Image (cartoon, coloured by chain):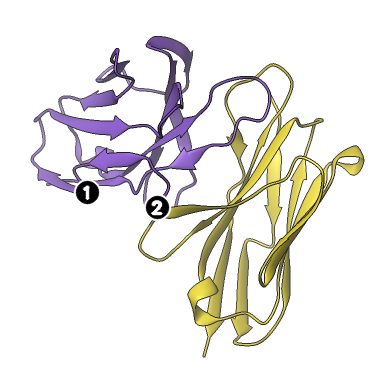
């Protein structure tokens, strides 16, 4: 168990809908990362938060947004869903500093858009 | 940004065989991790190894930072070793690790 909790584990929805994925980081970790992994693809970095503030942004679509709350949990909101958004979405957490900054991954949320 | 390349892309082994997976990176790193993604999709931390050698059971890893590569050794492979192995490197002042495209390993009984 990595200590990173993601819910839900599976999500099936229809095109055009909106969903929210939730992540609770490891105790003591201040940084949360979101990644997307489509079928047979590598991990695509979406966005990073550190202690409630956005720190870095990757190739995140405008239809996607995220935030990190004061208790450090994070949510990734996906709206106007398309078939191509079907993927495994991972959250990872780390202490967040520039030094030893080990990432631990949650079990992922498998999103199916029908 | 830093480029990370993994080889081989695919590997098929018989149970009991040994293997070496390689991760090359284009710049100096201050952070390097190896992960195993099992067939159920879970990403499991294997090693944090920006330099030196570490061992954990049948797995070991070596990073030669000056030559910009890391190796993951799997000895006496088992079917449960199947999955995709990723390395991820962090360099300079970046907070975002760059992942390689992975090595897909299948171990047959």
Left or right: where A51 falls relative to B69: left
Q: Which chain is purple?
A: A
Instruction: Report the residue that reaches farthest toward the front.
Output: A28
The percent position of residue A33, horizontal first and vertical second, equals 43, 28
Q: Please, which chain is the residue tagged with disc 2 on?
A: A
A24 vs A51, left or right, is left
Q: Which mark is residue A54?
A: none
Residue that appears at 63% across and 61% down: B9
User: Is label 2 or label 1 in front?
Assistant: 2
Residues packed near mark 2 inside 10 Å, few (<14), some (14 to 19) or many (20 plus) = few
Q: Is residue B52 above or below residue A58?
A: below
Q: Position of residue A104 (x, y in %)?
A: 48, 41
Q: CA distance from mark 2 to mark 1?
A: 15 Å
- Name the mark on residue A1: 2
Quadrant position of residue A82: top left
- Which residue does the numbered mark 1 point to in the structure image? A9
Q: Earlier in the sequence, mark 2 or mark 1?
A: 2
Residue B100, given in percent of the width and then of the height, sits at: 62, 45
Rendered hue of chain B is: yellow
Helix, strand or loop status at disc 1: loop
Residue at x-position 69% and y-position 62%: B8
């Amino acid at each position: 168990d990595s200590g990173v909790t993601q819910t839900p584990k599976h999500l099936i929805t229809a095109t055009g809908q909106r969903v929210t994925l939730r992540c609770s980081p490891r105790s003591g970790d201040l940084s949360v990362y979101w990644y997307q992994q489509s079928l047979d693809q590598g991990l695509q970095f979406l966005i990073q938060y550190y202690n409630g503030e956005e720190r870095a942004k990757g190739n995140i679509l405008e239809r996607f947004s995220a935030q990190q709350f004061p208790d450090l949990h994070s949510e990734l909101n996906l709206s106007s869903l398309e078939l191509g958004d079907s993927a495994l979405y991972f959250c990872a957490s780390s202490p967040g500093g520039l030094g030893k900054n080990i990432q631990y991954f949650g079990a992922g949320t498998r999103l199916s858009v029908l | 940004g830093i480029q990370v390349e993994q080889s081989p892309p695919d590997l098929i082994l018989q149970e009991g065989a040994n293997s070496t997976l390689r991760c090359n990176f284009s710049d100096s790193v201050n952070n390097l991790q190896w992960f195993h993604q099992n067939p159920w999709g879970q990403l499991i931390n294997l090693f944090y190894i920006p330099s030196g050698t570490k061992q954990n059971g049948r797995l070991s890893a070596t990073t030669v930072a000056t030559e910009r590569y890391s190796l993951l050794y799997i000895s006496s492979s088992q079917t449960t070793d199947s999955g995709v192995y990723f390395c991820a490197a962090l360099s300079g002042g970046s907070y975002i690790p760059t992942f390689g495209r992975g090595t897909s390993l299948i171990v047959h009984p």
